Image (cartoon, helix red, strand yellow):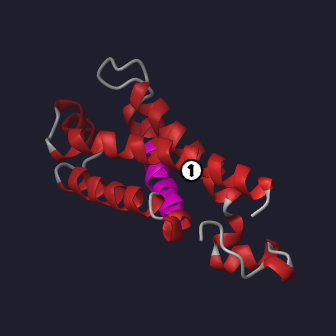
Amino acid sequence: MNAFCKTHTVASWIFQLIAAGILLQTLFFKFTAAPESVYIFTTLGMEPWGRIGTGVVELIASVLLLTPRTVPWGAMLALGVMSGAIMGHLTKLGIVVMDDGGLLFALALIVFGSCLIVLFLRRRQIPVIGTAFAPAASASQSFDR
């Protein structure tokens, strides 16, 4: 593995840990029915199943982000969930929710951005897209073997 690949690996893991860390930290609030979570999902018309379902999907995305062979799938799943969160903030919730100063919106943007970076760094691991960008000689090489 050359230094360029090592740099990509380290950078990817930093952004994976950021995204998974935020997703895992917010699970506590979703699964314990914290007032902020209940308010958010009530406002969106999705309480309690949307809150619990979103928590389960975020847990799955976190596990996938922390498992080397499934990182791209976790990043794509987290992008989908964060797209919904961002749209919820922009359409119904507002940037600031229950006087949080925009923290939840900012965290959604950080996870979204981190996952975009991870997907860019690991684009060759995405089965359909990755083969179009992989050089012929190294198409069989994996990122984290």
Q: Classify mark 1: helix, strand or loop.
A: helix
Left or right: residue 28 versus residue 127 is left
Query: Residue visible at 45% across and 64% down?
Result: 67
Query: Residue visible at 51% across and 65% down?
Result: 68
User: As rendered, which of 30 and 6 lies closer to the eye?
Assistant: 6
Q: Residue furthest right?
A: 136
| Residue 81 lies within the magenta run | yes
Query: Residue visible at 71% across and 54% down?
Result: 6
Query: Residue visible at 19% across and 56% down?
Result: 49
Q: Residue 36 in the image: x percent, y percent? A: 23, 31
Q: Main secondary structure of the magenta part?
A: helix
**Which segment did they paint magenta?**
73-85
Type of amino acid at the residue the image marks with label 1? Trp
Q: Residue 25 in the image: x percent, y percent? A: 32, 39
**From what the image shows, is residue 127 above or below residue 57?**
below
User: As rendered, which of 99 and 55 lies closer to the eye?
Assistant: 55
Left or right: residue 16 versus residue 96 is right
User: As rendered, which of 54 and 24 lies closer to the eye?
Assistant: 24
Residue 123 in view? yes
Q: Residue 53 in the image: x percent, y percent? A: 26, 59
Q: Quadrant of residue 39?
A: top left
User: As rendered, which of 47 and 11 lies closer to the eye?
Assistant: 11
| Residue 29 lies within the magenta run | no
**From what the image shows, is residue 15 above or below residue 135?**
above
Instruction: Give neighbour class at mark 1: few <14, some 14-19, many 20+ (Cα, 10 Å).
Output: some
Left or right: residue 111 versus residue 61 is right
Q: Residue 74 in the image: x percent, y percent? A: 48, 62
Residue 42 in view? no
Residue wearing tag 1: 13
